[in-house]
Amino acid sequence: MDWKSFYNYLTNFNTMEVEFKIRVNGVSRRIKADPETPMLYILRNNLTLNGPKFGCGLAQCGACMMLIDGVAVPSCTYPLQNVGQSEVTTLEGLSQEGGKLHPVQQSFFEEQAAQCGYCTNGLIMASVALLRRKSDPSETEIRAELQRNICRCGIHARAIRAVKKLSDR
Amino acid sequence: MGKNQQSRRAFIQSLGVLALGFSMSGTGCSRFKKEQADPSAPKIRTRELDMEEIDSWLVIREDGRVTIMTGKMELGQGITTAIAQVAAEELHMNMSLIDVHLAETGYTPDEGYTAGSRSIETSAMSVRRAAASAREYLLEMASQELSIPKIALTIEDGQIGGQGKSTTIYTLLNGKYFETKISSDAPLYANAERKIVGQSVARMDINSMVTGKSHFIHDLRFPAMVHARIVRPPAQAAKLTSVDTQAISKLPGLAKFIRVGSLVAVIAEDEYQAIKLAKAVSYFLAWDYQKALPANRSLMQYIRSLPADSKMDKKSEAWSDHTIANSPVRHRAAYFKPYIMHAANGPSCGIARYADGRLWVWTHSQGVYPLRGALADLVGLAEEHIHVKGVPGSGCYGHNGADDVAAEAALLAMEFPGRHVRLQWMREEENAWEPYGTAMVLEVEAGLDSQGRITGWKYDLWSDDHGVRPGGDADNLMPAWYIEKGHGKAKSGFRGGAIRNSEPYYSIPQLHLQSHIFRGPLRRSSLRGLGAYANVFAIESFMDELADKVSIDPIDFRIRHLNDERAIACLKQLAKQIKSIKKQNQQGIGIGFARYKNQAAYCAVAAHVRVDQQTNKVEVIKLWAAVDAGEVINPDGLKNQIEGGMVQSISWGLMEEVNFDDTQVTNLNWDSYPILRFQEAPAIHIDVIDHPHEVPLGAGEAAQGPATAALVNAVYQATGIRVRQLPVIKALQHSALRVKPLA
């Protein structure tokens, strides 16, 4: 986009706010926003959820992952207008009634698979999606699934162990 | 009593309503002065902070909980849990009754920076002594109060009792301070019972992380908080020459356009709008900037060509210039380590609010007090009018953008008073503007006698300085360079960082160690391990090269040159770990050893690698470590640190290098700055050698040097190619063009 068309786009973006009805963590929510707003900002700022984290804004690190109908996707490049009728799930939506941890959350806790914890959201969301798709992933499959996620503290071996524990294999 | 408690309860409620996330709000701490007229004005402890007093480290609350005040920050290293463990042990208290209050000006002791693997050695040990002293003091009080000899009393979870009578620690203190110095002769339960310390207690904060509870600075939300983004110049050396303010003023959703000298920012109510606005504004600015970086030349040669401040760091009395020359075996080699990023997972974030002449700053800086001093210098407020609260951020591994973003948020808040201003850097800002770990060149020369013992060792290192932290000086805060208020460039940093571990831990009769400090092309400061990473990489590579020259096993060769039994024990443990490993074709096992800073933790690492001869692809199959960190507070916490350190180190060593063109750094995202991911992650095994009655030794940075050394030594074993210029993958690609690998 050259600067003129970009400028035109910007001068219009206030009028571009549209109301959407989306389902997040099992609850229907009304959101009024620029349709192109990445879901990351909707989830964090409009819905005050902490799970998805801003890491790169480029879908390269996985810190912002959410589930769209059970599939882990980076929310930083997923526009609000694409959500439609899909079910959005965040880290907060995984815990079961009474605050009981989801098995993947429990496993990450048991393995102490965190240091700073900034990547934890993405790793858990990716693992939940993997185990939903395949109940008995091999270590190779686990690694391949988590390849989209960046961890700078180096807890890789612990995260792999946490997911392996839940594999039926 | 009842009345007293009621009035106190009312007081706590008022604290809870106020302060918006600041400090003790909602934690029920009753020891602080009643609010000033401004509800969010910084509260100050009614008692002066004195590191020698119990009250500076420990607060007994009326709900029976204990708050530990530490001047350190949680960086993901687990210090919060370790500190709670030592306190719980001495107070005989369940850890769930203990809270840890992280560094905050005016509240916690000034413990400088959370850096250098020093937090267990310093903060945790101070807390241990304070907690033991508090316990003894409370037992004395209870003895008098209940008329029971102290020896007949027991303390458990805040209850003190004996002979059928009991009281609580809060009742005894009745809301008063201890007003007592820490006693150095209070007995330590850690030496006797040791029920909590030494156990792999689960980290206190991981539950919040796995459930998405508010934990990070990024998660702080204040009413009416606005979002800011900086519009960066095209180069570090840049000046804003013109601004199309008319065009900018028409941009919708712009709460404020801010220009202070050449520092440009936008503020918006909505975060995504701020991001779009920053991009839009960039089209309406003109910059004068320099194309000053030495692109397209060998950085190793460039560094060696720079003027340097040279110093002799050590010259043995016995040193003779002829020793090496006259030795039957001689060897020399030069090593190179490029600029490396901290590359935090989450870009730096700061929040600030300015109102009525006072400034509040929330930061993931490693040092709230030094940052406050630098902020005072930057914004022209007195330190007592600035309140800085530490909140965990993404792991930092040293001095990254944390202080800069806090300073930028502060400057913007002063231009936009009354509201909380939140600023988070974008990925490309984090990568292009953080202070890197400096590039270094290391040259070693040594001689060996006929028995394979080192006769003399000559070492020359070239490095920029490290540790260019704010330290009370605004010049070291990046935004200071752009606001055009007379601040200079970053001052000289910490020369000691460059020579960290430059002296081998081996006994060598003649040493000649020199350092040459240059001013390099890129901004630099402290990255995990500082100079120790490159120095240990060079020393341990060279030790392997020497061992190879005289055909001695690398572990034996090192042990022959060690006098310290604990160091030898680590290497022997490592040897045991790897003894039975069968190397297959194209595989190699290498080792590396160091004692961090030559005085902290001992760490011996082995790496098992496979290098594909066709593609030069390096697979790190497994890493082993044997670690001696003295008294271990939390074995799993220690393992997690060593494990993470090793993985980070082999990521640095394998693939990381900051690149630049003539204008700016070019690795702006994870594609152009790849780090080790899950498919490349090695298996890991760590043995911890515990010494419960020795002093604890800092270990958070101990693995950095040894792991990369083990990696390059393993690559040599696998390929016959000696990588002396990091990163390994690039070096192998280059050598593939020149040298045919050994069959």
Image (cartoon, rainbow, N blue to C red):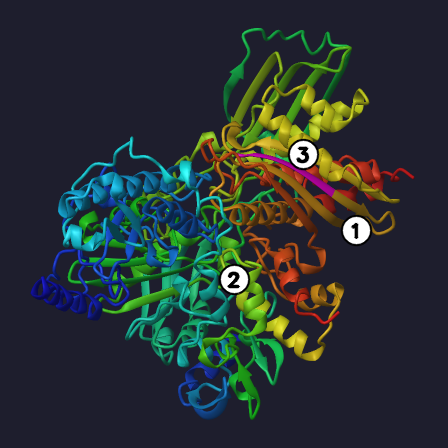
The three-letter amino acid code for the residue at tag 1 is: Lys
The quadrant of the rendering that contains the C terminus of chain B is: top right
Which chain letter goes with mark 3? Answer: B
In the picture, measured across the screen, residue B589 lies left or right of residue B480, that is right
Which chain letter goes with mark 2? Answer: B
Label 1 – label 2 distance at C-alpha: 28 Å
Q: Nearer the viewer, residue B245 or B254?
A: B254
Label 2 – label 3 distance at C-alpha: 42 Å
Q: Nearer the viewer, residue B157 or A84?
A: B157
Which chain letter goes with mark 1? Answer: B
Q: Name the residue carrying label 1.
A: B617
Which residue lies at the image location 34% right of the left edge and 71% below the top edge?
A: B221
Residue B370 lies, with reference to residue A102, above or below; the image says above
In the picture, measured across the screen, residue A162 lies left or right of residue B159, that is right
Q: Name the residue carrying label 3.
A: B573
Q: The residue tagged with tag 2: helix, strand or loop?
A: helix
Label 1 – label 3 distance at C-alpha: 30 Å
User: Can you tell which quarter of the image residue B285 is in?
Assistant: bottom left
Residue A116, position as x, y percentages in the image: 49, 57
Residue B649 lies, with reference to residue B357, above or below; the image says above
Mark 1 vs mark 2, foreground winner is 1
Q: Name the residue carrying label 2.
A: B427
Residue B382 shows in the view: no
Q: The residue tagged with tag 1: helix, strand or loop?
A: loop
The answer to which of marks 2 and 3 sits earlier in the sequence is 2
In the picture, measured across the screen, residue A56 lies left or right of residue A131, that is left
| Contact, mark 2 vs mark 3 (Cβ under 8 Å) | no
Mark 2 vs mark 3, foreground winner is 3
The verdict on residue B602 being magenta is yes
